[in-house]
Image: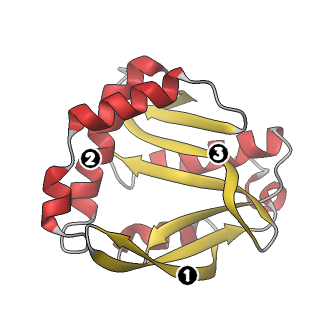
Amino acid sequence: MIIRDALPSDARGIAEIHVDSWRATYRGIVPDEYLAAMSHDTNEARHRIYLSTPRAESWTLVATDDAGTIDGFANFGRVRETMWGLDGEVYAIYLRPGTERRGAGRALMAACARRLLENGFRSMLVWVLAENRSRYFYERCGGLPVTSKHITIGGAILEEICYGWKDLATSWGSGE
């Protein structure tokens, strides 16, 4: 597995993972109509624009197999909503359905933490839907529940849980 910075040419692979993982993970949680309306093409265009526009304190990484196929991605940077002194945030982390439990998720999280540390951040958080069965992954990675809030997706009111790591150097500094 290789973890590297995402390129604009990775937009299609990222879009497919984004849409397909939402459809697989959030079926029965997010309204079916919302999931059905998601589009690889629309998502690709959005990711291509994002990856083509340099942003201060925001990065996207991909996890690829040895053949170069993208199996996962993470987007992260400065926290969007300051809380509890946490300064970094994983905005999105998704794996290609069927590639879970092979180490890509942990490798991406560790790479996010290292990049944040390299850029002067001390801590990080991630928001995850409470009904997402994959949320326990963050606990296995040492994240602690910090708070929760309600959000609306496709007309459904859903609970999100915030997991946090107060000290990245202690939690991830060893290069897990």
Give how far across and how far down residue 169 sits, in percent.
Answer: 83, 55
The residue at the far right in this view is 120
Q: Is mark 1 on a helix, strand or loop?
A: strand
Residue at 47% across / 73% down in the picture? 136
Kindly tell me whether residue 146 is visible in this rendering: yes
Residue, disc 1: 148
Camera-side residue of 118 and 79: 79
Q: What residue type is labelled 2?
A: Val
Q: Is 88 or 61 nearer to us in this picture?
A: 88
Q: In which quarter of the image is residue 18?
A: top left
Other-residue count near label 3 (Cα within 10 Å), few / some / many at <14 / 14–19 / ≥20: many
Indicate the position of residue 99 as horizontal and vertical percent values. 31, 47
Q: Can residue 1 be seen in this view?
A: no
The crowding category of the residue bearing disc 1, from other C-alpha atoms within 10 Å (few below 14, some 14 to 19, many at least 20), is some
Of mark 3 and mark 1, the one earlier in the sequence is 3
Question: What's the mark number on residue 19?
Answer: 2
Identify which residue, 38 or 29, lies in the foreground: 38
Gap in angstroms between the C-alphas marked 3 and 1: 22 Å
In the rendered image, residue 36, in percent from the top left (x then y), is placed at 13, 54
Q: What residue type is labelled 1?
A: Ser
Q: Give the number of the mark in front: 3 or 1.
A: 1
111 to the left or right of 98: right
Q: Name the residue under label 3.
A: 112
